Image (cartoon, rainbow, N blue to C red):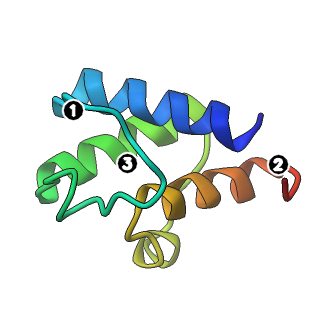
Amino acid sequence: MTRGEILAVVEQLAREHVGLAGSLAPGMRLVEDMELDSLKALTLAVEIENRFRILLTPEIEAEIATVGDLVEAVARLLGAPDA
């Protein structure tokens, strides 16, 4: 799965589960730009784990500040190539 495909799935999940109205860009910050509070962030994390069948550990979550960070984390966990 490419990073673009991962981004599209994350955007779809964000629309369905946390009320995202616009579109996502890799540079968007999850808290400041997407306005995710702790409940919305947890909801999105759980939905991403379920959809991709991965586990976002607290260590991984601590490294995620932007949409791009999230996409990279998912790609790494899926074993996607570095492209």
User: Looking at numbered disc 2 in the image, what kind of residue is underneath it?
Assistant: Ala
State the separation of the CA atoms marked 3 and 2.
19 Å
Residue name at image x 32 percent, y 42 percent: 44
Asked which secondary structure carries label 2, the reply is loop
Compared across the picture, whether 24 is left or right of 52 comes to left
> How dense is the environment of label 2, judged by Cα within 10 Å: few (below 14), some, or many (20 and up)?
few
Asked which secondary structure carries label 3, the reply is helix
Q: Check disc 2 and report the residue beneath it.
A: 80
Q: Position of residue 11 (x, y in %)?
A: 41, 32
> How dense is the environment of label 3, judged by Cα within 10 Å: few (below 14), some, or many (20 and up)?
some
Q: Check disc 3 and report the residue beneath it.
A: 45
Q: Position of residue 41 (x, y in %)?
A: 24, 53
Residue name at image x 38 percent, y 41 percent: 24
Image quarter hosting the N terminus: top right
Q: Check disc 1 and report the residue beneath it.
A: 20
User: Looking at numbered disc 1 in the image, what kind of residue is underneath it?
Assistant: Leu
State the separation of the CA atoms marked 1 and 2.
26 Å
Note whether 33 is above or below 47 in the view shown. below
Q: Going from the N terminus, do you reach mark 3 or mark 2 first?
A: 3
Q: Going from the N terminus, do you reach mark 1 or mark 2 first?
A: 1
User: Looking at numbered disc 3 in the image, what kind of residue is underneath it?
Assistant: Ala
Q: Position of residue 77 (x, y in %)?
A: 70, 55
Asked which secondary structure carries label 1, the reply is loop
Q: Residue furthest right?
A: 81
Residue closer to the observer: 55 or 26? 26
Between marks 3 and 2 in the image, the one whose residue lies nearer the viewer? 2
